[in-house]
Amino acid sequence: MRKFSKFLLVMVVGAAAAYGIARSTPLWFAPPQRATVDINDPQLIQRGEYLSRVADCAACHTAPGGKPYAGGLGMQTPMGTIYSTNITPDRAQGIGSYSYADFERAVRRGIRADGQPLYPAMPYVSYMISSDDEIKALYAYFMSSVQPVAQDNAASTIPWPASMRWPLSYWQLMFARPRTHTPDPALDASAQRGAYLVEGFAHCGACHTPRGLAFQEKALGDDDSRHFLSGSVLEGWYAKNLRDEGTGLASWKEDEIVQFLRTGRTDRSAAFGGMADVVEHSTQHMTAEDLQAMAHYLKQLPPREGHAQQWLPKQDLTTEALRNGDYRVPGALAYSEHCQACHRADGKGAPRIYPALAGNSIVFADDPSSLIQVTLAGGATPHTPHDRMAFTMPGFAHVSNGELAQIMTFIRNGWGNRASAVSADDIARMRRVVADKPVHYLPEEAAQ
């Protein structure tokens, strides 16, 4: 009994010490950066508005149908749903009472005004490299030009004890330590700018870089591991490989990347899922110079070791077979029934309307998750002024798992494409992901 009491005492003291250290970390890990900011400076506000677009703040902090920046967007995690918070300058529910020091700590250090750590769903590990002047501009914009909204914040559905915030302090100590951007002297000026945007405010790595066991990004910039931007699955979507290799961007030209980021479409491809939100809220508003810089930087990222530098298509035997009514290949008949009217027998679709399936790196990506999800649940292209209409693809959830698996395997290996097969189990797994999609938090009185 005495030994048990000593053990219990050690456990209690250890837990108390761990909690105390975690709660003290903001004092030395992220000391307040006090500064005077003129929130009425029109030039500062204008710059802050642009940076808020680059950082894609609206996409995460605006629920569908909700008021701008009022929060409520549900984000799916393996442990539960996290809801984005109200970042309007409402003093009670938003960030209206935040000093510049509070704002800077939240954006660059992931520390709330009450000293609690933020979930890494907030990409502060990327924003960390931004400059003081950029954070001041953001602060001026949010405090002076965003409409205050009195909408409360929804609690996450992550169960206790995983919902406790203080252990995240140790996550931050391991994976979100203060850092700055280190320019690569081998890059030209445009690629330097692109690297700064991609690694920083544009936070491309938050979706496109694989995560480790602790949900940390395996790389925050290009290094010898070449994990950076090599593709990752998030909320059931495969954020594709953005490196200049066969299943990445090798088949894309710089101008195509710019066009995709500006309009959400190219003659071959279209944005859907989370990327459609990125285009609609962020990249379409960026300057031509910044988009070109990002594309230029991405195209110089070398392929990973053991991965093909170029994508070489096989001989196209699919087009002639479909046109001749030859449906011997599994999935061919079902493709003809469900898909061919839009995507055509030659798999080339209709430029800027129906995406091509032939030679489209999103189709033969390393991971078929995005292809499976958009086929099951459907998707919509982003609204931009560059195209007269946005188009919606219907979902095909009514089709059986086996038939969908055959269709997608056929698509991923037709018209010269080459990729892994899709199984019925893959479809069943994605059905569960789609079924578990969070319902966004939108109080009735806060809806537009």
Image: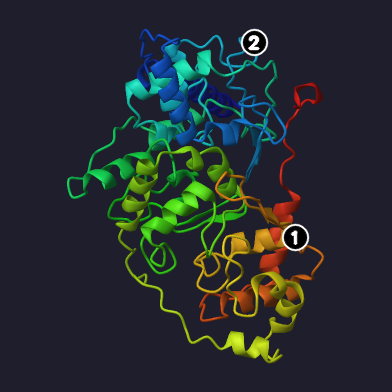
**3D distance between C-alphas at marks 2 and 1:** 41 Å
User: Residue 344 at what x, y percent from top left?
Assistant: 65, 75
Q: Which of 340 and 439 is in front in this view?
A: 340
Q: Mark 1 belongs to which amino acid?
A: Gly
User: Residue 444 at what x, y percent from top left?
Assistant: 81, 25
User: Residue 323 at what x, y percent from top left?
Assistant: 66, 87
Q: Is residue 131 left or right of residue 257?
A: left
Q: Residue at x 48, y 49 (%)?
A: 261
Circle 2 residues within 10 Å: few <14, some 14–19, many ≥20: few
Residue 136 against residue 416 in the figure, above or below: above
Residue 390 against residue 9 in the figure, above or below: below
What kind of element bears circle 1? loop
Q: Indicate which disc, 2 or 1, sits on the residue closer to the N terminus.
A: 2
Picture quarter with the C terminus: top right
- Which residue ends up furthest to the left in the rendered image? 185
User: Residue 114 at what x, y percent from top left?
Assistant: 53, 14
Q: Which residue is drawn at 55% across and 68% down?
A: 363
Q: Which residue is drawn at 54% across and 56% down?
A: 265
Question: Is residue 242 visible in this depiction of the protein?
Answer: no
- Which residue ends up furthest to the front in the rendered image? 388
Q: Mark 2 belongs to which amino acid?
A: Ala
Give the residue at mark 2.
Answer: 92
Q: Marks 1 and 2: in contact by CB < 8 Å?
A: no
What kind of element bears circle 2? loop
Q: Which of 345 and 374 is in front in this view?
A: 345
Report the disc number at residue 395. Answer: 1
Report the disc number at residue 149. Answer: none
Q: Residue at x 45, y 18 (%)?
A: 139
Q: Which of 166 and 410 is in front in this view?
A: 410
